[in-house]
Image: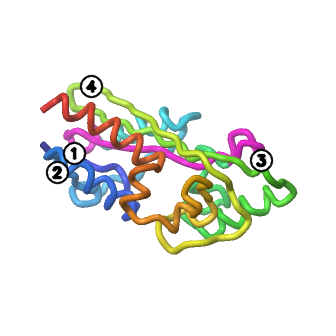
Amino acid sequence: MKLVLATHNQGKIRELKECLAEIGWEAIPVSDISDVPDPAETGETFKENALQKAHYYMKAVQLPVLSDDSGIIADVLKDEPGIYSARYAGVHGDDEANNKKLVERLKSYQGDDRKGHYECVIAVVFPDGKEITTEGKCYGVIRDFEKGNGGFGYDPLFYLPEKGKTMAELSMEEKNEISHRGRALRAMVEELRKLK
């Protein structure tokens, strides 16, 4: 079974390919089979954006498409950065600028006020119109300094008290076990397993 991955993020592609291979699904990055431009993300929630992207690419490639939308939320800032996580500082995918902006926005907060969570919604849309969505969350503390070289995005700022490490200090195995994407993906894997 083939599943097209609606992302250009190499970190995500690596994580998704690994998990899907375990249940016999061949994951293909959308850039390998189509050069359609990326869709505008106009949804107001992670779920809306994930479904929107999956439908858009499914129409282009006529294969099942897996898409996700995820981000980090600083509890004290309500929904920030939220659905704007990847473009928080203005340029999509500028991790350094995004991290700096989040640190700046949180600089007057301490202790429990720095709690936050990662959230991920994964959507799979099939050519027959069938939709499946799953979600995952991971809770931690958003620090004002970076530590660790692994992961991507806000991972060097996101501290996990129960692990005593940031997300960027975890091995890929540890990260997949506890991350928002790992949790959403495990739930999706169970859904996809039922289809075989």
Q: Is residue 162 left or right of residue 76?
A: left
Seen in the picture, residue 92 relative to 71 is either above or below; the reply is below
Q: Which mark is residue 129?
A: 4
22 vs 91, nearest the viewer:
22
Quarter location, residue 183? top left
Picture residue at 59% right of the left edge, 55% below the top? 160
Q: At 55% across and 72% down in the image, what residue appears?
A: 148
Q: Position of residue 178 (x, y in %)?
A: 45, 49
Asked whether residue 178 is drawn in magenta, I would say: no
Q: Earlier in the sequence, mark 4 or mark 1?
A: 1
CA gap between label 2 and label 1 equals: 6 Å
The boundaries of the magenta stretch are 58-80
> Residue 3 bears which disc, if any?
1
The kind of secondary structure element at disc 1 is strand
Tell me the residue at 50%/46% (across/down): 70
* Comparing labels 3 and 2, the label whose residue is closer to the camera: 3
Circles 4 and 3: CB distance less than 8 Å? Answer: no
Amino acid bearing label 1 = Leu
> Which numbered disc flags the more N-terminal residue, 4 or 2?
2
Which dot, 4 or 3, sits closer to the camera?
3
Q: Residue 114: image x %, image y %?
A: 75, 51
Q: Position of residue 18 (x, y in %)?
A: 26, 56
Amino acid marked by disc 2: Glu
Q: Mark 4 is on which residue type?
A: Gly
- Mark 2, residue position: 26
State the CA–CA distance, disc 4 to disc 3: 43 Å
> 69 left or right of 26?
right
Q: Are marks 2 and 1 in contact (CB under 8 Å)?
A: yes
Q: Secondary structure at mark 4?
A: loop
The residue pinned by badge 3 equals: 112
